[in-house]
Image (spheres, rainbow, N blue to C red):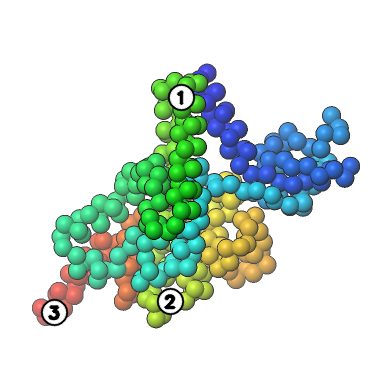
Amino acid sequence: MAPLHFAGCWRFSASASAASECVCDCGTIKKANGFALRAGAVKSCGCSKRAADMVGQRFGMLTVTARVRHNNAAPLTPYDYWRRNHALHHASSGNLDHRGFGDIDTLSVREFLARPRWRQILYRLYRHPIVMFGVGPTYLFILRHRLPIGMMRGGWKPWLSTMGTNTAIAILVAAMIRLLGYAPFLLVHLPITVLAASIGVWLFYVQHQFEDTSWSHDEAWSFHEAALHGSSHYHLPGVLRWFTANIGVHHIHHLCSRIPCYRLPDVLRDHPELAAVGRITLLQSLRCVRLALWDEKRRRLISFREADIGRSVEKGEHRG
């Protein structure tokens, strides 16, 4: 029962991460968390005995009128650190001269071939699926996010956000271990963390690492071009779209990040011509795993094998 007890506590914690302001039929304003609304646990202000923003929707006698809070969806990620990195990512996504902000390390074919052999091997290892979607995400969320790496000189806010998050995690972990013991805690929470981290990295990977993506140097880079063609439209089944808060509509998110996730499908409905831009299905996304290098000549992502073949062909032409 201990693992179930633990899982229940974490579910309760997650459900409290978002709240909506509602107006009851009696006129009373009431705040309720999204999980309680969806589950039907709250249907009135209490005058009679469903979380992203659900403005306009009705749940029993309640109508959602406004979103009042939305905490970071990744509890192991310091909010201010993530917010700054995310803003830099949007401002530089697809720019070959400004890489390294919230993105997957991507080399061009020319850059890869110019590296010494040992660095080529390291890049191949980094791009291997076991590292990219297994070891890497676990390291990223459990270890790397414990320090504001890349923002060491960014002032006190990233440090405060990071250390505050670390302190909250430490207190919560200590309390859960004291309540349940080390073994049940690790048995339940470690797989949850590893799986969630891997899913998160996979989604981010597919959003930018697809064959017909767009990368350009400063002089040719355009925000709108990078947003629409450097980010994918990951067309997932309905259930997965709901669980991922429509983040698969990533090209629209990059084009205008102020559009809330629950309105992204409305944009595609009102502008159907955008639905086909960068569209990738769940099955097609599996082929993205092999892509690792940006081919500046063909302007698309290619695999190591394609790069090796192309190099061999060029050598043959030179010999001829």
Q: Nearer the viewer, mark 2 or mark 3?
A: 2
Query: Residue at 27% across / 65% down in the picture?
Result: 306
The amino acid on which the numbered mark 3 sits, given as a three-letter code, is His
Residue at the left extreme of this rendering: 319
Vertical comparison of 135 with 211: above or below: above
Instruction: Tell which of 163 and 53 is nearer to you.
Output: 163
Q: Which amino acid does label 1 sit on?
A: Ile
Q: Mark 2 points at which residue?
A: 221
Asked if one can make out residue 154 in the rendered structure from this viewpoint, the answer is yes
Give the distance between the C-alpha atoms of the residues marked 2 and 3, in whole angstroms: 33 Å
Real-space Cα separation, disc 2 to disc 1, in angstroms: 50 Å
Q: Can residue 230 be seen in this view?
A: no
Residue denoted by label 1 = 177
Coordinates of residue 210 in the picture (x, y in percent): 41, 62
In the displayed structure image, the side of residue 162 where residue 275 appears, left or right = right
- Given this view, does label 1 or label 3 mark the residue nearer the observer? 1
Which residue was labeled with disc 3?
A: 318
Q: What residue type is labelled 2?
A: Trp
Location of residue 243 with respect to 226 vertically, above or below: above
Q: Position of residue 53 (x, y in %)?
A: 68, 51
Residue occupying image coordinates x 44% and y 20%: 181
Q: Considering the numbered disc 3 on the image, is that residue within a helix, a strand or a loop?
A: helix
Horizontal and vertical percent for residue 179? 50, 21
Disc 1 and disc 3: Cα gap in Å? 65 Å
Identified at 84% across, 29% down, the residue is: 49
Q: Residues within 10 Å of mark 3 (few under 14, many from 20)?
A: few
How busy is the neighbourhood of tag 1: few (under 14 within 10 Å), some, or many (20 plus)? Answer: some
Q: Which residue is at 58% across, 51% downward? A: 245
**Which is more toward the observer, 216 or 18?**
18
